[in-house]
Amino acid sequence: MKDNLRRLWRRLTDATRKSGLDREFQAELTSHVDMLSDELRQQGMSPEDARRAALIKLGALEPTRELHRETRGLPFFDNLAQDLSYTFRTMRREAAFTTFAIVIVGLGIGASISVFSVVNALLLRSLPFRDANQLVWLINENVEGLSGQTVQVDNFLDFKKQNQSFSDMAGYMAFYGSGDNNLTGAGDPERLNGVQVSQNFFQLLGVVPQLGRYFTDEECKWNGAKAVLLSHGLWERRFSSDTHIVGRAIILNDQPYTVAGVLPASFSFGSVFAPGTNFDLFSPFPLTSETNRWGNTLLIVGRLKPGVKLQTAQAEATILAKQIQQAHPERNMFGAVLSLLSDHVSGRLRTALLVLSFAVGLVMLIVCANLSNLLLARTATRRKEIAVRIALGAGRMRLIKQMLTESIVLSCCGGALGLLLAFAGTKALSNLQSLNIPLLETVHVDPAALGFTLLIALVTGILFGLLPAIQLPGVSLHDTLKETTRGSSDGRGHGWIRNALVISEVAFACVLLIGAGLLIRSFLRVLDIDLGFHPERTAALRIDPGPKYTTREQVNTYYNEALRRAKEIPGVEVAGLTDSLPLGKNRTWSVEAVGHIYPREEMHLAFVHIISDGYFQTMGIPLRAGRDLTERDTVGTAPVIVINESMARDLWPGENALGKKMKGGPERQVVGIVGDVHHLSVELGAGSEMYIPVRQTGDVQSVDLVVRTSLAPADLAGAIRAALTPMAPNLAMNEFRTLQTMVDRSVSPRRFIVTLLGAFALFALLLASLGIYGVISYSVSQRSKEIGIRMALGASAGDLQRRILLQTLGLAAAGLFLGVGAAIVLGRSLRGLLYGITATDPLTFLAILTLLALVAGAAGYFPARRASKIDPMVALRAN
């Protein structure tokens, strides 16, 4: 062994001498091997074994035939263990670089996993139902408003009986209200959200109660036995997970209901069918002649028979709907429009989620480009180490494997950090109740996300490590060692690679920032929309009269007393009642102007609001003509109505609608015209709306007290409770809400996308600025001799700064040129998400280009300033 080591050392010294290296480098080479040998001897190895191990660890795989035979036979995992051991030693030695790289990769991978988890939940993973790919959503028509989309009971029963495409069909009552069920008894009164479903609804979805049973035939009859199924959340929260709850009675709206069962925790009706709303109770909806008279009420889900395609089912549904309509002209219009339930649930967010995925991909490319640049610069500090390994006989593949091992280990460490961030991020997202986004509460890091983490960590490590790895063996041993002795780095010939990486970073950041800028500008335009009402300082509370108020006079007395008490609360400016707040319910009625004859297919639909005096002032809805409703508009007085401007134009185009009569229910006279309100959503325009006096109709399903106040919400809630408790002792306060909260929830999907994309854009901007700074700073350090010569020849500090800033801006300009072209293409794909601006909005493009130019200038200024302060004599001596 000693002879082999001596021969190896002689060959090394001969090789270095023939390469033109001076004795100083030979001494450094010897010192490098000796230092590693000393470390190994301190661990208990003999001097000969320590020196042999040092040479092997430095990559001496082929210096002599004997040593080659001894080392090349090492098992694969032994070589891997050597590479990993060397990598971890390097990471400990360069702790600052290691920490920076892991944090950058961790942030990128954490964002990637979080977005993947959202995309997986909404687009990739099946809905949480049995054979979800067979579930189909059926609506009446593709129109806005539930009255147009829902189906009449008899039309549904006929279609279910006669079709040949579906194995089963079920439905639920679309016109549920927020807090329709007032739970009293043990504990404080609480308003609960409930929905009525057909008897077979849960069976069709494949949802099996965790406790108890489904609804019985008796419970599904008109005025049958009253029963409810509890959600798992309500069972845990209100009933302390009592396993004996089944069969017991609970008090809802002052009436006893039997608990038929408890649904499993995996089922969330709101997450799929009503995003942003939590449902606590489910009761049977009787499919009878009584509910058929209510008109269009049902939203339908069907299960296709095995082998039946959606297109086939749609063709049959179109024909069958026409036949049913012709056979029963007395019923409401019926036209069956089918879509996969998964498309109905998350289809409207598909484009936005794809944009987010694209944004994450750009961020990860910027991360890879940034770390590649850092690794290229880092190799300058390792040139002597690399020279030693090449001198000791390390081959091309051996060096590439070692460098890739280092980058993959860094990436996997970043992946571990990113996984922790993703666990926290997805947990926070799934608990956001204020976002009107389907399936959000099902977002979590599942096995698919873990596999994605491993994949993206490996790909990221290879991407940012491959370029620096393949650059190392590309230089001859002679040139490499000579550059090392001069204090140079990897040669200026490779500078273009670093510049190209910076240009790509700027281009990617430009695309991401412009995309985010377009969506942010759209979001601001949405917030600037005149809603037709003023949500600020306005709050609402559900105050249904309850079953003890049986006559119209008693109910009106209750309304009058509630308004009087509310108005007497200090800080309350005005108050009113309504059964339908904007951005809430959207039931519509057929309406017609008296004296006009309309073809059936041209009947007008209008949103119905049943209100009291004071409602318009409370909401800030302007009165355009005529008068407001008053407390004198009550039982026994002439039926009146107030309509909005759109309805006046629709029913009486070019005429004055005041004093005209219309039918929407009983015949009523128009006494006032108010401004239009965005009722369905913030982004959709106003439709026809009519306002009926609450004291003149009994068709009230729920009542909200609306107040405008200067009080804080918490103080207002307590004051209202104190004022109304004497007349409504079972008043539940959990349904107290501000109108601004309702507006915020309406725009929450857009806000969610904009927030995430904006965060990615800022992260990309930070990485791009770091990349520019790193390259320019490195360039300055490598050109210190040139800078010293220029300054010695009379170049001023200002000239040097201008030269370096021009270099910086040149790189930025190239990146911006490429980025703008790609951003124009991206803008076209964003058209469906934009509101009020074009895909090539000049202001957005100009603002982003200016921002990136300023950031690039700032990133280049500091290295330029440092260069201008270089002492020429020090720089010349150092080189």
Image (cartoon, rainbow, N blue to C red):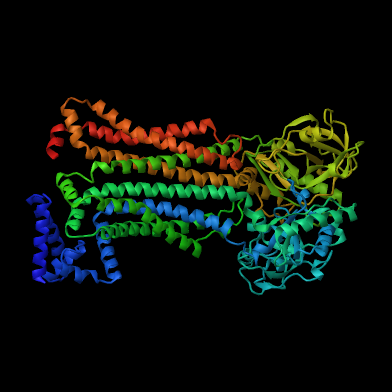
Which residue, as the protein is rendered here, is positioned at the far right? 595
Q: Is residue 350 left or right of residue 506?
A: right
Residue 460 figure quarter: bottom left
Residue 270 figure quarter: bottom right
Between residue 51 and residue 101, name the one nearer to us: 51
* Residue 711 locus on image (x, y percent): 61, 41
Which residue, as the protein is rendered here, is positioned at the far bottom? 244
Residue 244 in the image: above or below residue 270 = below
Instruction: Decide if residue 180 is in sight here.
Output: yes
Between residue 599 and residue 435, name the one nearer to us: 599
Q: Quadrant of the C terminus?
A: top left
* Residue 158 locus on image (x, y percent): 84, 61
Q: Is residue 236 left or right of residue 675?
A: left
Q: Residue at x 41, y 41 (%)?
A: 765
Instruction: Decide if residue 30 is in sight here.
Output: no
Q: Residue at x 70, y 61 (%)?
A: 309
Q: Is residue 712 left or right of residue 730?
A: left
* Residue 422 locus on image (x, y percent): 46, 57
Between residue 642 and residue 385, name the one nearer to us: 385
Between residue 435 and residue 729, name the one nearer to us: 435
Q: Residue at x 20, y 26 (%)?
A: 795
* Residue 419 locus on image (x, y percent): 43, 59
Residue 855 in the image: above or below residue 590 = above
